[in-house]
Image (tube, rainbow, N blue to C red):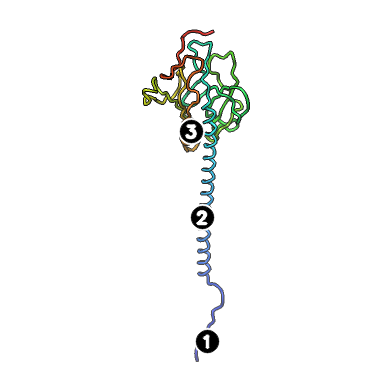
Amino acid sequence: MSAPVRHRVGGFTLIELLAAITLLAVLTAVLMGSVRGAERSTAAAAALGERTEQYARTYGFLREHLAGALPLRWRREVGQPLKFAGRSDSVTYLAPITSQIATGGVNWWQLIVAPAANHPERKQLVLRRAAPDPEEKSVPDIPAADPIVLADHIESLTLAYFDPGDDPLNNPDAGTWRDAWDENARMPAMIRIQITEQGGAVWPELRIPLKLTQALGCNFDFQRQRCIIQAGPRG
């Protein structure tokens, strides 16, 4: 007598079920990794776009505003020094108020990196301003209150000033960059700006030619690019 035929009951075995669960877990991990990667790529692209927009907007403003620095002088001081103070980490100058900020008049301006008002750990590139005082005899300390914020999350600002030399027409290659500007007979020909963000990202270098590099109210030597001033007090 032959043995009875056994029919397999429908369904999965335990091994098949474990294999299916393992495969599903692997596919889920791959899918989640792809999603996270896409999110990171999107976030990185958005951050890069914001950074690019920020430095493009900031540089566009500074090209117009800083280029308009006025070479005005202290009329009642010995040697009539320029109303300009250039340091490696800040620059203070006189310039008209642009239409992007307000209207009318000339103000003191200072470009500097400073802590944010409500978040000292976060630094910003700011433009401080103050109205000129007729009784001033030196470059004033610009109040830190109510600054114009040009860029956020900025670590440092590095400035340099181009000295074209004593005879730029006949010796154009003699020009040099200085870390500070203390020359009273003339303004720098250009200002170089380098900005580093918090986190280490460095913006492209910006060089701004000044529109008025010669000093006003003096006998200006165009060949030597110097202002000829009689030493002594002025009334």
Which residue is the site of mark 3?
195
Task: Classify 31 as above or below 154.
Answer: below
Instruction: Choose mark 2 or mark 1, whichever is in front.
Output: 2
Q: Which mark is residue 4?
A: 1
Could you say whether the residue bearing mark 2 is in a helix, strand or loop? helix
Could you give the CA–CA distance between mark 2 and mark 1, rounded to whole angstroms? 53 Å
The location of residue 220, given as percent across then percent down, is 46, 16
The location of residue 234, given as percent across then percent down, is 52, 8
Residue at position x 37%, y 26% in the image: 173
Which residue is the site of mark 2?
34
In which image quadrant can residue 122 be found? top right
Upstream in sequence: badge 2 or badge 1: 1
The location of residue 87, given as percent across then percent down, is 47, 23
Q: Amino acid at mark 2?
A: Ser
The location of residue 149, given as percent across then percent down, is 58, 31
Q: Amino acid at mark 1?
A: Pro
Say if mark 3 contacts mark 2, CB within 8 Å: no
